[in-house]
Amino acid sequence: MYSSDVKQCAQQIVKESFADILIGEFRIPSQAQMESFLLENIDYSFDEYQTTKKIQLSHLRWSREQIAAELEMQKRRYEEKFRNNLKVAAQKAVNEVENLVSSLKDTIKAWRTKNLEY
């Protein structure tokens, strides 16, 4: 889940940190930092209106209280699933940043060897 968001996030971090990577001052973001960054860039809204309509259509005889209780239960499940997916996505983004930085460093080293050493 969120695989394109993970890749874009990692690429953006590496692009924005290019100068720091070159001079060796870049630090891989922590899990918590990456989760925070992803939260800013991923839409995770729960559509209460649509969910309520679906509940009402599938349970025509339920009272408002029953519908509200079901809505809260579905909202809690959605948020829990989102938090779990966010943790997984953040770890994948951290790994992707590590891979991109490593690849970039290898490319720079190869370029230096080819062009700067006699």
Image (tube, rainbow, N blue to C red):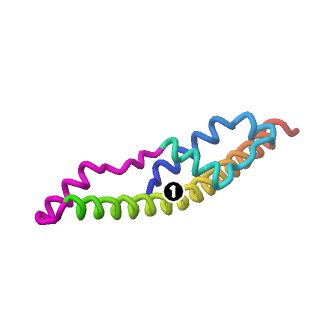
Amino acid under disc 1: Leu
Horizontal side of residue 91 vs 4, given as left or right: right
User: What residue appears at the point 50 percent right and 63 percent down from the top-left corner?
Assistant: 84
Horizontal side of residue 85 vs 26, given as left or right: left
Give the x, y percent position of residue 76.
40, 61
Residue 101, above or below 66: above
Does the segment drawn in magenta span residue 53?
Answer: yes
* Secondary structure state at the residue bearing disc 1: helix
Residue denoted by label 1: 86
User: What residue appears at the point 52 percent right and 46 percent down from the top-left corner?
Assistant: 39
Give the x, y percent position of residue 66.
24, 64
Image quarter (top left, top right, bottom left or bottom right) of the N terminus: bottom left
Give the x, y percent position of residue 97.
63, 50
Q: Quadrant of residue 104?
A: top right
How crowded pointer 1 is (Cα within 10 Å; few <14, some 14-19, many 20+) is rated as many
Horizontal side of residue 116 vs 18, given as left or right: right
Q: Which of 37/48 is in front?
A: 48
Image quarter (top left, top right, bottom left or bottom right) of the C terminus: top right
Horizontal side of residue 26 vs 80, given as left or right: right
Q: Which of 24/75 is in front?
A: 75
Does the segment drawn in magenta span residue 26?
Answer: no
User: What residue appears at the point 74 percent right and 40 percent down from the top-left corner?
Assistant: 21
Q: How many marks?
A: 1
Q: Residue furthest left?
A: 60
Q: Which of 117/60 is in front?
A: 60
Query: In the image, which residues are magenta?
Result: 42-63
Residue 22, above or below 89: above
Residue 118, above or below 50: above
